[in-house]
Image (cartoon, rainbow, N blue to C red):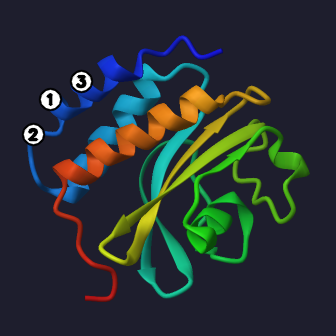
Amino acid sequence: MSTTDYTLLNRQLEALLDTRDWLTNTAQTCAFLMHEIPDLNWAGFYLQRQPGTLILGPFQGLPACNPIPFDKGVCGAAATSRRTQRVADVHAFPGHIACDAASRSELVVPIECGAELWGVLDLDSPQPARFSDADQAGIERLVDVFVAASDLPIPGA
């Protein structure tokens, strides 16, 4: 069961994101998540800057895989389905991309701008089954805070 106070984190992130600049806000959000959410070893954004492919954006953690096609890994599954992917054991996920061998579980939230996929927020943990239903709902709300605070460029525009 999650002991993270996501209501408090929402208020803190709203206060932190004091600019409309999406690049600054992605960097701030990654650092904030790594600092405030326990048991993460990677937090970052992958952006859809070309069709069918996610390109590495701001992140915190070890160097990451780039690019990620939509048909690969947990990030690709989130991008394709436009649904949050919560994976208790990444090693059991078909097509998982192992950027950091220490990662055991993953949560990926798609981010849309209008009707287009803008990118995804990717969180990894070295702890198996790290993310609960409450964590998923809380992190999805944090993504909503990020989107509301940011002027996101429409992909392909």
Q: Residue at x 51, y 36 (%)?
A: 137
Q: Residue furthest top?
A: 3
Q: CA distance from mark 1 to mark 3?
A: 5 Å
Crowd band around label 3 with a 10 angstrom C-alpha radius: few (<14), some (14–19), many (20+):
few
Residue 40 in sight from this viewpoint: no
Q: Is residue 130 above or below residue 74?
A: above
The percent coordinates of residue 122 (x first, y second) are 54, 49
**136 and 120: which one is in front?**
136
Quadrant holding the C terminus: bottom left
Residue, disc 3: 12
Instruction: Find the distance from the CA under tag 3 to the CA under tag 2.
Output: 11 Å
Q: Which residue lies most toward the right here?
A: 92
Q: Residue tagged by mark 2?
A: 18
Q: Are dots 1 and 3 in contact, CB under 8 Å?
A: yes
For image coordinates 22% across by 58% down, the residue present is 22
Q: Nearer the viewer, residue 146 or 69?
A: 146
Tag 2 near tag 1, CB within 8 Å: yes
Looking at numbered disc 3 in the image, what kind of residue is underneath it?
A: Gln
Separation (CA) of disc 2 from disc 1: 6 Å
Callout 1, which amino acid? Answer: Ala
Is 37 left or right of 67, judged from the image as shown? left
The residue shown at (33%, 40%) is 29
x and y percentages locating residue 115 in the rendered image = 36, 78
Q: Is residue 119 above or below residue 140?
A: below
Which mark identifies residue 15?
1
Quarter containing the N terminus: top right
User: Which disc number belongs to residue 82?
Assistant: none
Q: Is residue 136 visible?
A: yes
Q: Secondary structure at mark 1?
A: helix
Q: The disc labelled 2 sits on which kind of residue? A: Asp
